[in-house]
Image (cartoon, grey):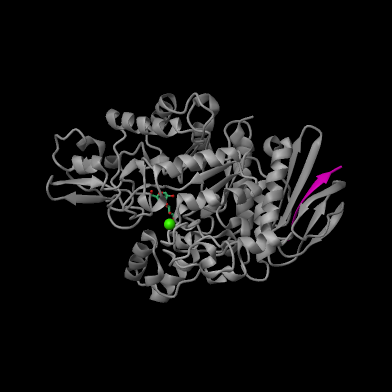
Amino acid sequence: MKWWQKAVVYQIYPRSFQDSNGDGIGDLPGIISRLDYLAKLGIGAIWLSPVYQSPNVDNGYDISDYQAIAKEYGSMEDMDLLIKEARKRQIRIVMDLVVNHTSDQHPWFIEAKRSKTNPYHDFYVWSDQANDLGSTFGGSAWEYDEHLKQYYLHLFTKQQPDLNWANENLRKAIYQMMNFWIAKGIGGFRMDVIDLIGKQPAQKITANGPKLHTYLQEMNQATFGNSDLMTVGETWGASPKEAKLYSDPKRQELAMVFQFEHMTLDQGQSKWDVKSLDVAKLKQVLSKWQQELSQTGWNSLFWNNHDLPRIVSRWGDEGQYRLKSAKLFAILLHLMKGTPYIYQGEEIGMTNRKVTSIDQVDDIESRNAYQELLAQGLSQKEALSAINKVGRDNARTPMQWDASPNAGFSQGQPWLAVNPNYQTINVAQALADPNSIFYTYQKLIELRNNNPLVVLGDYQLLKTSPEVFAYYRTYQEQKWLVVANLSHKENSIEITDEISQVILDNGAKPLVKGRNLLEPYDALVVKLA
Ligand code: TEU
Ligand code: CA
């Protein structure tokens, strides 16, 4: 068993985690000061969103120097100290690797723009014509360069020019940079939009290009191949078949990928067209992924990240049932097979935050979408309502540590306003309350550490009423049953097994053999006789 099959990973969005010097921006010393808290939770790794030098057009996902720490986050000494202090607590640091594109301020791009014969020109993707390929953040994916009279490709903002992976020197430079970080003793890489690196824009192929897996195998050989590093690729476009190509150990590519099929179930025509969740579909999709990757490959398990709205607000109930529904989503996910990820604040049930004007929105994706939605004929109110539901700032408000001003995140003015509910939802409160969401997560991590069933057991979905999600995990002689009522209404479940013990619940009454009534958002794990 690999360490990353047993570990739970905690994602930190450094800008919003803990500010140590009052400038309103979270930083590395701030993270170090909170390691004991994370150790108490029990996590085995931190996925650190980008801390590299960046003009911050896309909050660090536009990198101008891969081997320098952004000044506002601290220094390389702070980074080394973070790695060391985390290791002392058996926590590894997984770095965000953003190599589909750089910032337009990266020296490579500045050189690339000088002339068509500059050795760095071919590090990027140029074309004499623009086709109708669009950018994820709105508008065309092509930007005209007046000087070179050529277009360059940017699948995200125009300040994020796409790298040309067909260029061998570029690939070597990236591998060298990765080895620089590996030598520091990091725990692995989370690879930003890695499914795009094989792009062939002339054919309008972006995800899953023909050479994608060749590049990843080459990268594996040139960098982390012979180490025990954890690697997870962000792949919005992956089907189970593709996920197996990435994560089949025999193929020597990545440890696992983030797939997003379950996270797009409430989308209509676009991300901004939000529908209600069909729980039956959620069951079907997650069960499909559990089955498909049961023999080959490995799943990653998540509800949240820095791009997604908060799960309690999205599919749970942030009001009356906040505690119960947050625990339900924790139990449902952490008992599945795969590596679970917790996004900062999820473990205390942080919620979405509402804005009343576009001026309160920081995120580039939401700001661009707002203009596009208005142009499509939506009212300002409708556009803001969509942003309030699924905008990325929902996940990016500062971490709520305690009830003091600015939630204990900063002594100064936070870069993004704190969610006003911090006086009741915060870490200090959670740690003081034995019934808090925090302790449910802690218990789930402990269960994973102590029971091979949780890591390795087979998964099997039970046939139940549509809103009840129930599955078995079996390993050797052991069998567990997980039941979750994803509804603010009562439901029921018929159980054919003898139950020997309740392992964990969210306030739900113990289950019995036969018919059981389930209260809203009831969730529990039981051991079968
Ligand atoms: O996200 C990939 C991506 O496609 C997102 O833009 C996603 O579609 C969107 O956020 C959903 O709302 C990664 C990073 O996680 C994201 O933060 C970056 O902005 C993006 O890549 C570009 O690097
Ligand atoms: Ca700071």
Depth check, front residue: 199 or 249: 249
Depth check, front residue: 386 or 321: 321
Horizontal side of 450 relative to 189 (left or right) equals right
In magenta segment, residue 523 = yes
Name which quarter of the figure residue 505 lies in.
bottom right
Depth check, front residue: 466 or 313: 313
In magenta segment, residue 355 = no
Residue 391 visible in the picture: no
Horizontal side of 496 relative to 153 (left or right) equals right
Horizontal side of 445 relative to 136 (left or right) equals right
Depth check, front residue: 28 or 158: 28
Above-or-below relation of 98 to 370: above
Tell me the magenta residue range: 522-529
* Residue depicted at 44% across the width and 66% down the height: 412
Q: Position of residue 468 (x, y in %)?
A: 71, 56
Q: Main secondary structure of the magenta part?
A: strand
* Residue depicted at 51% across the width and 26% down the height: 227
Name which quarter of the figure residue 88 lies in.
top right
